[in-house]
């Protein structure tokens, strides 16, 4: 990590006129200056076109000290107060270095040390008068496999949630080995500790941005979806949020044995002891290089090992923050009182096999799925349940199977764990089935711009193709707004139960299926 000085605090003359593009808010650590921008308004938005016309963005507010020097690999330390007014007009440094290209979401990397920060988007940057309740709050945790991703994406801009009366916060956290790697004498799960401190910051400060700390929904996609499910099952996090929206959630639940084995392997490759002193003696660049090599998928069984054991770097069952797997925690009743929406796209990772049709063309389908981890008893029922995708060829079938094992099976186990609890709050299940105009199927990340209602954003065609349907974004986004505001996504979307297995299927048109994940059940 480059050891450039932290951004200096600034204090300039405040323009309080109504025409000023700037707006200021006091946080517990000091005053910050944000900037007004317009929202996107159209007849189909969640307010029927009557929402807020502008949104105030406060970018790069530090919630913790820069994790460098003696704070490298340490638990996050709350940001010390500053004097004067701190500009919050540009995104702050990101934990991601370079663009690993693991998603189709534009997620820029920004150099610098102060990587633990929040971005706040609000239509009403002031504390509610007379102690009244503020607006509901959405806190977004980005994805990227726990080793990549950035909160500075233009797709994560909260302007249209602001338009519809929701204050939005995006948070950063340490990634890869910095955030989750085992070190003998260092705090475990440093990335989780970053999430917790960021959520504490929201509890302490969001009222000054017009939000209600008593109505906080956490949401995320991919690793971010796994993050919010991890938090849902974490005893120590329950006071920090009130609802969960998990998009394509990929939990890690790394065992302590796997975590330690990887930590020792990385240390040995670096030629250092697996201690704070050892890892702090290594440059960020060298650690990232070894991390990449140590976690690379190599060999014919690498994919099956990933699907069976999960990611090597991510939230770890450490006996301190995480006492058991996420599903086991939910089955034990942790988070039962909080409403949950979760779902996946139909073919999350089929795009990874776009170049494989010729290679796989002549492999018998039964052999293909058996070699991909299915038992003999599962092969025939799975092929029968997935005839619709099988007709598109073996590459699509294998992509669907990987999707099912990586995302849908764990998701359905989460749903089942909560369904067994008589006092659980509602659970709502969805599928995102609309096929991308670029890929011809619903791939990983495709639903994110629909969730944020930002189809007018950059880099949309490579993911969604030309002219993705705004009506679908209206529906999906409106359901998200309703859930954040009330804990219920609306009457048109029934709660999931063992009896009905109701699943909302986002497509054109959107429908409700009796059992939207029937094709996955042979794997359960």
Image (cartoon, rainbow, N blue to C red):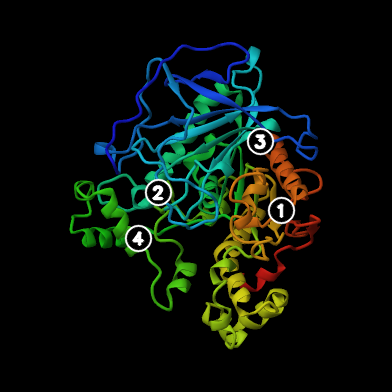
- Residue annotated with mark 4: 292
Q: Mark 3: few, some, or many residues within 10 Å (few <14, many ≥20)?
A: many
For marks 3 and 1, give the CA distance: 19 Å
Q: Earlier in the sequence, mark 4 or mark 3?
A: 3
Pointer 4: residues within 10 angstroms few (<14), some, or many (20+)? some
Helix, strand or loop at mark 1? loop
User: Disc 2 or 4, which lies upstream in sequence?
Assistant: 2
Q: Name the residue located 29 percent from the left edge and 51 percent from the top edge.
A: 285
Q: Position of residue 495 (x, y in %)?
A: 74, 50
Q: Which residue matches tag 2?
A: 175
Residue at image mark 1: 468
Q: Nearer the viewer, residue 450 or 523?
A: 450
Image coordinates of residue 265 in percent, x first then y, are 27, 63
Residue with the mark numbered 3? 161
For label 1, count other residues whose C-alpha is less than 10 Å away and answer few (under 14), some (14-19) or many (20+): some
> Does 406 sit above or below residue 366?
above
Secondary structure state at the residue bearing disc 4: helix
- Callout 3: helix, strand or loop? helix
| Rendered position, 193 above or below 448 | above
**Callout 1 touching callout 2 (CB < 8 Å):** no
* Mark closer to the chain start, 4 or 1: 4
Spatial CA distance of label 2 from label 4 is 12 Å
Residue at 37% over, 41% down? 111
Quarter of the picture containing the C terminus is: bottom right
Q: Nearer the viewer, mark 3 or mark 1?
A: 1
Residue 370 position in % (x across, y down): 55, 82
Tell me the SS state at disc 2: loop
């Amino acid at each position: 990590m480059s050891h450039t000085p932290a951004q200096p605090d600034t204090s300039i003359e405040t323009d309080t006129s109504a025409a000023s593009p700037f707006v200021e808010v006091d946080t517990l650590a000091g005053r910050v200056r944000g900037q007004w921008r317009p929202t996107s308004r159209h007849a189909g938005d969640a307010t029927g076109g009557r929402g807020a016309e502008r949104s105030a963005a406060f970018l790069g507010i530090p919630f913790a000290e820069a994790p460098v020097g003696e704070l490298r690999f340490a638990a996050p330390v709350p940001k010390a107060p500053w004097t004067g007014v701190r500009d919050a007009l540009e995104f702050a440094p990101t934990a991601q270095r370079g663009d690993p290209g693991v998603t189709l979401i534009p997620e820029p990397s920004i150099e610098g040390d102060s990587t633990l920060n929040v971005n706040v988007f609000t239509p009403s940057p002031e504390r509610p008068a007379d102690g009244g309740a503020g607006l509901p709050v959405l806190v977004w945790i980005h994805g990227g496999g726990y080793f990549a991703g950035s909160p500075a994406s233009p797709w994560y801009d909260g302007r249209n949630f602001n338009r519809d009366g929701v204050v939005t916060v995006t948070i950063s956290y340490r990634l890869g080995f910095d955030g989750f790697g085992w070190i003998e004498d260092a705090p475990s799960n440093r990335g989780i500790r970053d999430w917790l401190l960021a959520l504490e910051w929201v509890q302490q400060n969001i009222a000054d941005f017009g939000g209600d700390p008593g109505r906080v929904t956490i949401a995320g996609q991919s690793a971010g979806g796994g993050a919010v499910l991890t938090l849902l099952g974490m005893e120590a996090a329950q006071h920090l949020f009130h609802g969960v929206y998990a998009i394509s959630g990929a939990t890690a639940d790394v065992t302590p044995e796997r975590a330690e084995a990887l930590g020792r392997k990385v240390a040995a490759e670096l030629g250092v002891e697996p201690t704070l002193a050892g890892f702090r003696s290594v440059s960020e660049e060298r650690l990232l290089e070894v991390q990449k090599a140590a976690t690379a998928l190599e060999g014919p069984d690498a994919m099956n090992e990933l699907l069976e054991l999960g990611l090597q770097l991510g939230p770890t069952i450490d006996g301190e923050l995480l006492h058991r797997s996420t599903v086991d925690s939910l089955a034990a009743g942790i988070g039962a009182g909080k409403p949950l929406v979760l779902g996946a796209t139909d073919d999350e990772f089929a795009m990874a096999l776009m170049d494989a049709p010729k290679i796989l063309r002549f492999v018998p389908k039964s052999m293909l799925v058996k070699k991909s981890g299915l038992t003999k008893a599962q092969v025939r029922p799975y092929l029968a349940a997935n005839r619709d995708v099988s007709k598109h060829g073996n590459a699509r079938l294998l992509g669907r199977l990987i999707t099912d094992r990586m995302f849908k099976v764990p998701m359905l186990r989460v749903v089942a764990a909560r369904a067994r609890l008589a006092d659980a709050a509602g659970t709502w299940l969805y599928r995102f089935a609309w096929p991308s105009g670029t890929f011809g199927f619903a791939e990983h990340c495709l639903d994110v711009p629909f969730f944020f209602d930002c189809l007018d954003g950059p880099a949309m065609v490579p993911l969604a193709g030309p002219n993705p349907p705004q009506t679908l974004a209206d529906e999906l986004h409106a359901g998200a707004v309703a859930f954040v505001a009330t804990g219920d996504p609306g009457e048109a979307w029934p709660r999931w139960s063992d009896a009905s297995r109701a699943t909302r299927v986002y497509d054109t048109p959107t429908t409700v299926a009796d059992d939207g994940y029937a094709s996955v059940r042979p794997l359960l």
